[in-house]
Amino acid sequence: MAKSYKSLKEDFVSNLSGGGIWEINLVTAVAPAAVLLWSTLQSRQDFFSKYGPLAFLTDFLLNVGAILTASTIYSSSPTALNLLLVLPAVGLYLVPPTSRTRQKRPVHPPPADGRKEQELPERPFVTHYRGSMMVVTCVAILAVDFKVFPRRFAKVETWGTSLMDMGVGSFVFSAGLVSARPVLKARAAEARSSVGASMTAAVRHSLPLMTLGLLRLYSVKGLDYAEHVSEYGVHWNFFFTLALLPPVVAFIQTLPTWLVSVDMIALFVSCVFQAALDSTSVTAYILIAPRDNLFSQNREGLVSVWGYLSIFLVGQAVGFDILPRTGSKLSRSIFGVHLDRPLLTRLLIWSLWYSLLLFLATSYQTLGLQVSRRLANLPYVLWVAAFNCAQLALFCAVETLAFPGLYTTTDQKSERQRYTHATSYILGAFNRNGLAIFLLANLLTGLVNLSTDTLHASRERAMATLFAYATILSIVAASLHWKNISIKL
Protein backbone atom coordinates (compact mmCIF):
# COMPACT_ATOMS: atom_id res chain seq x y z
CA MET A 1 0.00 0.00 0.00
CA ALA A 2 1.54 3.33 -1.05
CA LYS A 3 2.27 5.70 1.78
CA SER A 4 0.34 8.56 0.18
CA TYR A 5 -2.72 6.34 -0.20
CA LYS A 6 -2.32 5.18 3.42
CA SER A 7 -2.33 8.81 4.53
CA LEU A 8 -5.47 9.46 2.52
CA LYS A 9 -7.14 6.47 4.18
CA GLU A 10 -6.17 7.70 7.63
CA ASP A 11 -7.40 11.21 6.86
CA PHE A 12 -10.68 9.73 5.64
CA VAL A 13 -11.53 8.47 9.14
CA SER A 14 -9.86 11.21 11.20
CA ASN A 15 -11.04 14.51 12.70
CA LEU A 16 -14.74 13.68 12.36
CA SER A 17 -17.48 15.24 14.49
CA GLY A 18 -20.29 12.65 14.13
CA GLY A 19 -24.02 13.27 13.91
CA GLY A 20 -27.16 13.57 16.00
CA ILE A 21 -28.49 10.99 18.45
CA TRP A 22 -31.97 11.12 16.93
CA GLU A 23 -30.64 10.17 13.48
CA ILE A 24 -28.71 7.27 15.00
CA ASN A 25 -31.92 6.11 16.67
CA LEU A 26 -33.79 6.23 13.34
CA VAL A 27 -31.09 4.32 11.47
CA THR A 28 -30.80 1.61 14.12
CA ALA A 29 -34.60 1.36 14.43
CA VAL A 30 -34.43 -0.44 11.08
CA ALA A 31 -33.23 -3.57 12.92
CA PRO A 32 -36.35 -4.02 15.14
CA ALA A 33 -38.52 -2.90 12.20
CA ALA A 34 -37.02 -5.67 10.07
CA VAL A 35 -37.56 -8.18 12.88
CA LEU A 36 -41.16 -6.98 13.12
CA LEU A 37 -41.74 -7.86 9.47
CA TRP A 38 -39.89 -11.17 9.90
CA SER A 39 -41.97 -12.00 12.98
CA THR A 40 -45.22 -11.09 11.24
CA LEU A 41 -44.39 -13.34 8.28
CA GLN A 42 -43.59 -16.16 10.68
CA SER A 43 -46.45 -15.76 13.15
CA ARG A 44 -49.15 -15.07 10.53
CA GLN A 45 -47.96 -17.04 7.50
CA ASP A 46 -45.50 -19.57 8.96
CA PHE A 47 -43.12 -18.38 6.23
CA PHE A 48 -39.80 -19.50 7.73
CA SER A 49 -40.76 -22.86 9.26
CA LYS A 50 -39.62 -24.71 6.13
CA TYR A 51 -36.23 -23.06 5.82
CA GLY A 52 -35.18 -23.30 2.19
CA PRO A 53 -33.36 -20.96 -0.23
CA LEU A 54 -36.31 -18.53 -0.47
CA ALA A 55 -36.63 -18.31 3.32
CA PHE A 56 -32.87 -17.77 3.67
CA LEU A 57 -32.88 -15.04 1.01
CA THR A 58 -35.82 -13.28 2.66
CA ASP A 59 -34.21 -13.62 6.09
CA PHE A 60 -30.96 -12.18 4.71
CA LEU A 61 -32.59 -9.25 2.93
CA LEU A 62 -34.66 -8.32 5.97
CA ASN A 63 -32.17 -8.74 8.80
CA VAL A 64 -28.88 -8.03 7.02
CA GLY A 65 -29.74 -6.19 3.82
CA ALA A 66 -32.01 -3.68 5.54
CA ILE A 67 -29.29 -2.79 8.06
CA LEU A 68 -26.71 -2.45 5.28
CA THR A 69 -28.90 -0.14 3.20
CA ALA A 70 -29.92 1.90 6.26
CA SER A 71 -26.29 2.88 6.86
CA THR A 72 -25.48 3.52 3.19
CA ILE A 73 -27.95 4.32 0.40
CA TYR A 74 -30.87 4.98 2.79
CA SER A 75 -28.74 6.91 5.30
CA SER A 76 -30.45 10.19 4.37
CA SER A 77 -33.97 8.76 4.59
CA PRO A 78 -34.09 6.14 7.39
CA THR A 79 -37.73 7.02 8.14
CA ALA A 80 -38.72 5.92 4.64
CA LEU A 81 -36.92 2.60 5.08
CA ASN A 82 -38.57 2.05 8.44
CA LEU A 83 -41.99 2.65 6.85
CA LEU A 84 -41.14 0.22 4.03
CA LEU A 85 -40.61 -2.44 6.70
CA VAL A 86 -43.40 -1.57 9.14
CA LEU A 87 -46.28 -0.98 6.68
CA PRO A 88 -46.11 -4.49 5.12
CA ALA A 89 -46.13 -5.92 8.66
CA VAL A 90 -49.28 -3.93 9.43
CA GLY A 91 -50.81 -5.17 6.17
CA LEU A 92 -50.05 -8.78 7.05
CA TYR A 93 -51.89 -8.34 10.34
CA LEU A 94 -54.97 -7.37 8.35
CA VAL A 95 -54.80 -10.64 6.40
CA PRO A 96 -56.20 -13.77 8.10
CA PRO A 97 -53.41 -16.06 9.32
CA THR A 98 -52.78 -19.43 7.73
CA SER A 99 -54.49 -22.45 9.24
CA ARG A 100 -51.21 -23.66 10.71
CA THR A 101 -50.78 -20.48 12.76
CA ARG A 102 -54.38 -20.33 14.03
CA GLN A 103 -53.96 -21.66 17.51
CA LYS A 104 -54.91 -20.49 20.94
CA ARG A 105 -52.40 -19.78 23.61
CA PRO A 106 -51.70 -23.12 25.23
CA VAL A 107 -52.05 -23.35 28.96
CA HIS A 108 -50.00 -26.14 30.51
CA PRO A 109 -50.39 -27.23 34.12
CA PRO A 110 -47.23 -28.00 36.09
CA PRO A 111 -45.78 -31.41 35.18
CA ALA A 112 -47.08 -34.24 37.32
CA ASP A 113 -43.58 -35.46 38.16
CA GLY A 114 -42.79 -32.24 40.02
CA ARG A 115 -40.32 -30.80 37.50
CA LYS A 116 -39.94 -27.02 37.68
CA GLU A 117 -40.01 -24.48 34.92
CA GLN A 118 -36.67 -23.66 33.39
CA GLU A 119 -35.34 -20.72 35.41
CA LEU A 120 -33.43 -19.21 32.46
CA PRO A 121 -35.53 -19.56 29.30
CA GLU A 122 -34.04 -18.73 25.92
CA ARG A 123 -35.41 -15.39 24.79
CA PRO A 124 -35.76 -14.75 21.03
CA PHE A 125 -35.78 -10.98 21.48
CA VAL A 126 -32.34 -11.14 23.15
CA THR A 127 -31.06 -13.26 20.26
CA HIS A 128 -32.49 -10.76 17.77
CA TYR A 129 -30.95 -7.84 19.63
CA ARG A 130 -27.50 -9.43 19.81
CA GLY A 131 -27.64 -10.75 16.26
CA SER A 132 -28.67 -7.37 14.85
CA MET A 133 -25.98 -5.61 16.87
CA MET A 134 -23.39 -7.96 15.41
CA VAL A 135 -24.67 -7.38 11.87
CA VAL A 136 -24.47 -3.58 12.33
CA THR A 137 -20.95 -3.88 13.71
CA CYS A 138 -19.70 -6.15 10.92
CA VAL A 139 -21.28 -4.02 8.21
CA ALA A 140 -19.85 -0.77 9.60
CA ILE A 141 -16.21 -1.88 9.94
CA LEU A 142 -15.97 -2.35 6.15
CA ALA A 143 -18.55 0.20 4.98
CA VAL A 144 -16.68 3.01 6.77
CA ASP A 145 -13.88 2.70 4.19
CA PHE A 146 -16.25 3.60 1.34
CA LYS A 147 -17.70 7.02 0.56
CA VAL A 148 -21.19 5.51 0.40
CA PHE A 149 -21.00 5.31 4.21
CA PRO A 150 -21.60 8.86 5.54
CA ARG A 151 -18.72 10.42 7.49
CA ARG A 152 -21.13 11.41 10.26
CA PHE A 153 -21.60 7.68 11.01
CA ALA A 154 -17.84 7.07 11.45
CA LYS A 155 -16.13 7.32 14.84
CA VAL A 156 -15.71 10.88 16.06
CA GLU A 157 -12.29 12.23 16.91
CA THR A 158 -13.03 13.30 20.49
CA TRP A 159 -16.43 14.85 21.28
CA GLY A 160 -19.75 13.83 19.76
CA THR A 161 -21.89 10.83 18.82
CA SER A 162 -21.93 8.53 15.82
CA LEU A 163 -23.25 5.17 14.71
CA MET A 164 -19.85 3.49 15.02
CA ASP A 165 -19.24 5.00 18.45
CA MET A 166 -22.46 3.37 19.56
CA GLY A 167 -21.44 0.11 17.89
CA VAL A 168 -18.32 -0.25 20.04
CA GLY A 169 -20.22 0.39 23.26
CA SER A 170 -23.09 -1.89 22.22
CA PHE A 171 -20.64 -4.73 21.59
CA VAL A 172 -19.41 -4.46 25.20
CA PHE A 173 -22.94 -3.99 26.61
CA SER A 174 -24.10 -7.10 24.74
CA ALA A 175 -21.17 -9.11 26.10
CA GLY A 176 -22.09 -8.02 29.60
CA LEU A 177 -25.73 -8.96 29.05
CA VAL A 178 -25.01 -12.60 28.22
CA SER A 179 -22.28 -12.87 30.86
CA ALA A 180 -25.10 -12.79 33.41
CA ARG A 181 -26.35 -16.24 32.35
CA PRO A 182 -23.51 -18.38 33.82
CA VAL A 183 -23.58 -16.30 37.01
CA LEU A 184 -27.34 -16.85 37.33
CA LYS A 185 -26.91 -20.57 36.69
CA ALA A 186 -24.39 -20.75 39.51
CA ARG A 187 -26.74 -18.85 41.81
CA ALA A 188 -29.60 -21.18 40.93
CA ALA A 189 -27.41 -24.16 41.83
CA GLU A 190 -26.26 -22.31 44.98
CA ALA A 191 -22.68 -22.84 43.83
CA ARG A 192 -20.00 -20.35 44.86
CA SER A 193 -16.49 -20.36 43.43
CA SER A 194 -13.44 -19.17 45.33
CA VAL A 195 -11.71 -15.96 44.29
CA GLY A 196 -8.79 -17.97 42.95
CA ALA A 197 -10.97 -20.26 40.84
CA SER A 198 -12.97 -17.33 39.46
CA MET A 199 -9.83 -15.37 38.55
CA THR A 200 -8.25 -18.43 36.92
CA ALA A 201 -11.33 -18.98 34.75
CA ALA A 202 -11.41 -15.27 33.84
CA VAL A 203 -7.75 -15.25 32.82
CA ARG A 204 -8.32 -18.37 30.76
CA HIS A 205 -11.18 -16.55 29.00
CA SER A 206 -8.99 -13.48 28.42
CA LEU A 207 -6.05 -15.32 26.86
CA PRO A 208 -7.70 -15.96 23.44
CA LEU A 209 -8.77 -12.30 23.27
CA MET A 210 -5.25 -11.16 24.15
CA THR A 211 -3.92 -13.48 21.42
CA LEU A 212 -6.31 -11.97 18.88
CA GLY A 213 -5.18 -8.51 19.95
CA LEU A 214 -1.54 -9.44 19.40
CA LEU A 215 -2.32 -10.98 16.01
CA ARG A 216 -4.16 -7.83 14.94
CA LEU A 217 -1.28 -5.66 16.17
CA TYR A 218 1.23 -7.75 14.24
CA SER A 219 -0.82 -7.77 11.04
CA VAL A 220 -1.54 -4.00 11.13
CA LYS A 221 2.10 -3.09 11.70
CA GLY A 222 3.49 -5.79 9.40
CA LEU A 223 1.25 -4.89 6.44
CA ASP A 224 1.62 -1.12 6.98
CA TYR A 225 -2.17 -0.98 7.23
CA ALA A 226 -3.94 2.37 7.67
CA GLU A 227 -4.75 3.01 11.33
CA HIS A 228 -6.36 5.74 13.42
CA VAL A 229 -3.94 6.21 16.32
CA SER A 230 -6.19 8.44 18.45
CA GLU A 231 -8.85 5.72 18.51
CA TYR A 232 -7.06 3.38 20.95
CA GLY A 233 -3.38 4.27 20.69
CA VAL A 234 -0.29 3.17 18.79
CA HIS A 235 -0.38 -0.52 19.78
CA TRP A 236 -3.72 -0.97 21.55
CA ASN A 237 -6.85 -2.36 19.90
CA PHE A 238 -10.37 -3.38 20.88
CA PHE A 239 -9.41 -7.01 21.54
CA PHE A 240 -7.04 -5.88 24.33
CA THR A 241 -9.89 -3.92 25.92
CA LEU A 242 -12.14 -6.97 25.81
CA ALA A 243 -9.35 -9.11 27.31
CA LEU A 244 -8.96 -6.85 30.36
CA LEU A 245 -12.62 -6.96 31.37
CA PRO A 246 -13.14 -10.61 32.53
CA PRO A 247 -10.64 -10.60 35.46
CA VAL A 248 -12.06 -7.38 36.91
CA VAL A 249 -15.65 -8.57 36.49
CA ALA A 250 -14.75 -11.96 38.00
CA PHE A 251 -13.45 -10.25 41.11
CA ILE A 252 -16.63 -8.18 41.42
CA GLN A 253 -18.72 -11.36 41.15
CA THR A 254 -17.03 -12.77 44.24
CA LEU A 255 -18.57 -9.99 46.36
CA PRO A 256 -21.73 -10.97 48.28
CA THR A 257 -24.85 -10.24 46.22
CA TRP A 258 -26.48 -8.48 49.17
CA LEU A 259 -23.51 -6.14 49.57
CA VAL A 260 -23.76 -4.28 46.29
CA SER A 261 -25.34 -4.57 42.84
CA VAL A 262 -23.33 -4.36 39.65
CA ASP A 263 -25.33 -1.41 38.29
CA MET A 264 -24.39 0.58 41.40
CA ILE A 265 -20.74 -0.35 40.87
CA ALA A 266 -20.98 0.69 37.21
CA LEU A 267 -22.42 4.08 38.09
CA PHE A 268 -19.88 4.56 40.89
CA VAL A 269 -16.92 3.74 38.60
CA SER A 270 -18.24 6.07 35.87
CA CYS A 271 -18.80 8.95 38.27
CA VAL A 272 -15.37 8.58 39.90
CA PHE A 273 -13.71 8.40 36.47
CA GLN A 274 -15.66 11.47 35.31
CA ALA A 275 -14.61 13.35 38.43
CA ALA A 276 -10.99 12.48 37.66
CA LEU A 277 -11.42 13.74 34.10
CA ASP A 278 -12.93 17.03 35.31
CA SER A 279 -10.78 17.77 38.35
CA THR A 280 -7.34 16.63 37.19
CA SER A 281 -5.19 16.87 34.08
CA VAL A 282 -6.22 13.41 32.86
CA THR A 283 -8.33 14.78 29.99
CA ALA A 284 -5.54 17.05 28.74
CA TYR A 285 -3.07 14.19 29.06
CA ILE A 286 -5.23 11.89 26.92
CA LEU A 287 -5.93 14.51 24.26
CA ILE A 288 -2.67 16.39 23.79
CA ALA A 289 0.21 14.74 25.65
CA PRO A 290 3.20 13.58 23.55
CA ARG A 291 3.46 9.85 22.88
CA ASP A 292 6.94 9.40 24.33
CA ASN A 293 6.59 6.11 26.24
CA LEU A 294 4.60 2.90 26.03
CA PHE A 295 1.83 4.09 28.34
CA SER A 296 1.33 7.45 26.64
CA GLN A 297 1.41 5.80 23.22
CA ASN A 298 -1.62 3.70 24.24
CA ARG A 299 -3.29 6.04 26.71
CA GLU A 300 -6.72 6.07 24.98
CA GLY A 301 -7.04 2.30 25.17
CA LEU A 302 -5.71 1.99 28.71
CA VAL A 303 -7.71 4.82 30.27
CA SER A 304 -11.00 4.08 28.46
CA VAL A 305 -11.08 0.60 30.03
CA TRP A 306 -12.86 2.14 33.05
CA GLY A 307 -15.72 3.34 30.87
CA TYR A 308 -16.03 0.03 29.04
CA LEU A 309 -15.98 -1.80 32.38
CA SER A 310 -18.96 0.32 33.46
CA ILE A 311 -20.80 -0.46 30.22
CA PHE A 312 -20.13 -4.17 30.66
CA LEU A 313 -21.46 -4.09 34.22
CA VAL A 314 -24.61 -2.21 33.19
CA GLY A 315 -25.22 -4.86 30.52
CA GLN A 316 -24.71 -7.57 33.11
CA ALA A 317 -27.13 -5.87 35.52
CA VAL A 318 -29.79 -5.77 32.80
CA GLY A 319 -29.09 -9.45 32.11
CA PHE A 320 -29.61 -10.31 35.78
CA ASP A 321 -33.06 -8.73 35.50
CA ILE A 322 -34.37 -9.92 32.12
CA LEU A 323 -32.79 -13.34 31.54
CA PRO A 324 -34.54 -15.20 34.40
CA ARG A 325 -38.18 -16.15 33.96
CA THR A 326 -40.57 -13.42 35.04
CA GLY A 327 -41.28 -13.76 38.75
CA SER A 328 -38.11 -15.77 39.41
CA LYS A 329 -36.24 -15.03 42.62
CA LEU A 330 -33.06 -14.91 40.55
CA SER A 331 -34.18 -11.68 38.88
CA ARG A 332 -32.73 -8.41 40.20
CA SER A 333 -33.67 -5.01 38.81
CA ILE A 334 -32.37 -1.47 39.18
CA PHE A 335 -30.04 -1.11 42.20
CA GLY A 336 -30.85 -4.66 43.26
CA VAL A 337 -34.56 -3.98 43.82
CA HIS A 338 -36.78 -6.85 42.67
CA LEU A 339 -39.63 -5.66 40.45
CA ASP A 340 -42.29 -8.26 39.72
CA ARG A 341 -43.46 -6.52 36.54
CA PRO A 342 -43.84 -7.65 32.92
CA LEU A 343 -40.58 -7.94 31.04
CA LEU A 344 -41.35 -5.07 28.64
CA THR A 345 -42.23 -2.78 31.55
CA ARG A 346 -38.93 -3.50 33.27
CA LEU A 347 -36.97 -2.80 30.08
CA LEU A 348 -38.79 0.50 29.66
CA ILE A 349 -37.88 1.40 33.24
CA TRP A 350 -34.21 0.64 32.53
CA SER A 351 -34.32 2.74 29.36
CA LEU A 352 -36.07 5.69 31.01
CA TRP A 353 -33.71 5.58 34.01
CA TYR A 354 -30.55 5.82 31.93
CA SER A 355 -32.14 8.33 29.53
CA LEU A 356 -32.89 10.56 32.52
CA LEU A 357 -29.33 10.23 33.80
CA LEU A 358 -28.02 11.02 30.31
CA PHE A 359 -30.17 14.15 30.16
CA LEU A 360 -28.95 15.29 33.57
CA ALA A 361 -25.32 14.66 32.59
CA THR A 362 -25.46 16.49 29.25
CA SER A 363 -27.98 19.28 29.87
CA TYR A 364 -26.50 22.76 30.05
CA GLN A 365 -28.77 23.42 33.06
CA THR A 366 -27.05 20.63 35.03
CA LEU A 367 -23.58 19.17 34.34
CA GLY A 368 -23.30 20.15 30.68
CA LEU A 369 -20.95 17.27 29.79
CA GLN A 370 -20.25 16.08 26.23
CA VAL A 371 -20.23 12.48 25.03
CA SER A 372 -16.77 11.12 24.24
CA ARG A 373 -16.15 7.58 23.07
CA ARG A 374 -12.40 8.31 23.05
CA LEU A 375 -12.51 8.97 26.81
CA ALA A 376 -15.38 6.53 27.50
CA ASN A 377 -16.65 9.16 29.91
CA LEU A 378 -19.84 9.21 32.00
CA PRO A 379 -22.14 10.62 29.24
CA TYR A 380 -20.87 7.95 26.83
CA VAL A 381 -21.60 5.17 29.33
CA LEU A 382 -25.11 6.54 29.99
CA TRP A 383 -25.81 6.98 26.27
CA VAL A 384 -24.79 3.40 25.49
CA ALA A 385 -26.87 2.09 28.42
CA ALA A 386 -29.98 4.10 27.49
CA PHE A 387 -29.72 3.19 23.80
CA ASN A 388 -29.27 -0.54 24.34
CA CYS A 389 -32.04 -0.77 26.92
CA ALA A 390 -34.35 1.00 24.45
CA GLN A 391 -33.30 -1.40 21.66
CA LEU A 392 -34.01 -4.37 23.90
CA ALA A 393 -37.42 -2.88 24.74
CA LEU A 394 -38.25 -2.54 21.02
CA PHE A 395 -37.26 -6.13 20.26
CA CYS A 396 -39.22 -7.29 23.33
CA ALA A 397 -42.28 -5.35 22.15
CA VAL A 398 -42.08 -7.05 18.75
CA GLU A 399 -41.84 -10.47 20.40
CA THR A 400 -44.75 -9.70 22.74
CA LEU A 401 -46.91 -8.64 19.80
CA ALA A 402 -46.05 -11.46 17.41
CA PHE A 403 -45.57 -14.40 19.80
CA PRO A 404 -47.66 -13.67 22.93
CA GLY A 405 -47.73 -17.26 24.23
CA LEU A 406 -44.03 -17.88 23.95
CA TYR A 407 -43.26 -18.55 27.63
CA THR A 408 -46.46 -20.33 28.68
CA THR A 409 -45.09 -23.87 28.51
CA THR A 410 -43.45 -25.73 31.39
CA ASP A 411 -41.92 -28.32 29.09
CA GLN A 412 -38.35 -27.48 28.03
CA LYS A 413 -38.70 -29.31 24.73
CA SER A 414 -41.84 -27.38 23.79
CA GLU A 415 -40.27 -24.11 24.87
CA ARG A 416 -37.19 -24.85 22.76
CA GLN A 417 -39.44 -25.50 19.75
CA ARG A 418 -41.20 -22.18 20.34
CA TYR A 419 -37.87 -20.40 20.63
CA THR A 420 -36.75 -21.84 17.30
CA HIS A 421 -40.06 -20.91 15.68
CA ALA A 422 -39.83 -17.32 16.93
CA THR A 423 -36.13 -16.72 16.10
CA SER A 424 -34.58 -15.59 12.82
CA TYR A 425 -32.13 -18.24 11.64
CA ILE A 426 -29.57 -15.71 10.42
CA LEU A 427 -29.72 -13.54 13.54
CA GLY A 428 -29.51 -16.68 15.66
CA ALA A 429 -26.41 -17.68 13.69
CA PHE A 430 -24.73 -14.29 14.15
CA ASN A 431 -25.57 -14.41 17.86
CA ARG A 432 -24.27 -17.93 18.36
CA ASN A 433 -20.76 -17.35 16.98
CA GLY A 434 -20.61 -13.58 17.29
CA LEU A 435 -16.95 -13.15 18.21
CA ALA A 436 -15.78 -15.64 15.58
CA ILE A 437 -17.85 -13.90 12.89
CA PHE A 438 -16.50 -10.53 14.08
CA LEU A 439 -12.96 -11.90 13.67
CA LEU A 440 -13.80 -13.13 10.17
CA ALA A 441 -15.29 -9.71 9.37
CA ASN A 442 -12.01 -8.07 10.43
CA LEU A 443 -10.02 -10.43 8.19
CA LEU A 444 -12.30 -9.81 5.20
CA THR A 445 -12.18 -6.06 5.83
CA GLY A 446 -8.39 -6.16 5.72
CA LEU A 447 -8.44 -8.27 2.56
CA VAL A 448 -10.82 -5.86 0.79
CA ASN A 449 -8.78 -2.82 1.81
CA LEU A 450 -5.51 -4.37 0.66
CA SER A 451 -6.95 -5.40 -2.72
CA THR A 452 -9.40 -2.57 -3.51
CA ASP A 453 -9.19 1.19 -3.80
CA THR A 454 -12.14 1.82 -1.49
CA LEU A 455 -11.71 5.60 -1.46
CA HIS A 456 -12.40 5.95 -5.18
CA ALA A 457 -14.86 3.09 -5.63
CA SER A 458 -18.14 4.04 -7.30
CA ARG A 459 -21.40 3.85 -5.41
CA GLU A 460 -22.41 0.73 -7.37
CA ARG A 461 -19.09 -1.04 -6.80
CA ALA A 462 -19.15 -0.17 -3.11
CA MET A 463 -22.64 -1.59 -2.64
CA ALA A 464 -21.78 -4.73 -4.63
CA THR A 465 -18.68 -5.27 -2.48
CA LEU A 466 -20.58 -4.71 0.75
CA PHE A 467 -23.42 -7.06 -0.21
CA ALA A 468 -20.92 -9.75 -1.25
CA TYR A 469 -19.11 -9.31 2.07
CA ALA A 470 -22.37 -9.47 4.06
CA THR A 471 -23.43 -12.56 2.09
CA ILE A 472 -20.18 -14.38 2.89
CA LEU A 473 -20.52 -13.59 6.60
CA SER A 474 -24.16 -14.73 6.60
CA ILE A 475 -23.41 -17.99 4.79
CA VAL A 476 -20.52 -18.83 7.13
CA ALA A 477 -22.59 -17.98 10.21
CA ALA A 478 -25.59 -19.97 8.96
CA SER A 479 -23.42 -22.95 8.01
CA LEU A 480 -21.86 -23.09 11.48
CA HIS A 481 -25.34 -22.82 13.00
CA TRP A 482 -26.70 -25.58 10.76
CA LYS A 483 -23.81 -27.90 11.71
CA ASN A 484 -24.43 -27.09 15.40
CA ILE A 485 -20.91 -25.65 15.79
CA SER A 486 -20.19 -23.09 18.49
CA ILE A 487 -16.76 -21.47 18.35
CA LYS A 488 -15.81 -20.20 21.79
CA LEU A 489 -13.04 -17.59 21.87
Image (spheres, rainbow, N blue to C red):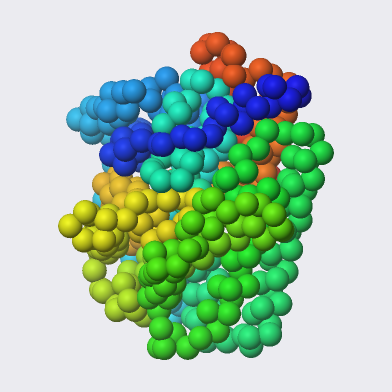
Residue 286: where, in percent of width, then height?
A: 54, 55
| Residue depicted at 73% across the width and 25% down the height | 3
Would residue 157 be found to the left or right of residue 350 on screen? right
| Residue depicted at 67% across the width and 60% down the height | 295
Residue 368: where, in percent of width, then height?
A: 27, 56
Among the 4 quarters of the image, the one containing residue 478: top right
Q: Residue furthest left?
A: 365
| Residue 37 can be seen, yes or no | yes
User: The C terminus lies in which quarter of the figure?
Assistant: bottom right
Would residue 205 be found to the left or right of residue 341 on screen? right
Instruction: Choose between 453 and 73: the one closer to the eye.
Output: 453
User: The N terminus lies in which quarter of the figure?
Assistant: top right
Would residue 166 be found to the left or right of residue 382 on screen? right
User: Height in image: 405 above or below 33?
Assistant: below
Residue 237: where, in percent of width, then height?
A: 65, 50
Among the 4 quarters of the image, the one containing residue 151: top left
Residue 86: where, in percent of width, then height?
A: 27, 31
User: Height in image: 424 above or below 362?
Assistant: above
Instruction: Choose between 416 and 5: the one closer to the eye.
Output: 5
Q: Residue furthest right?
A: 222
User: Height in image: 291 above or below 465?
Assistant: below
- Give the number of marks: 0
| Residue depicted at 33% across the width and 62% down the height | 408
| Residue depicted at 50% across the width and 81% down the height | 187
| Residue 317 can be seen, yes or no | no
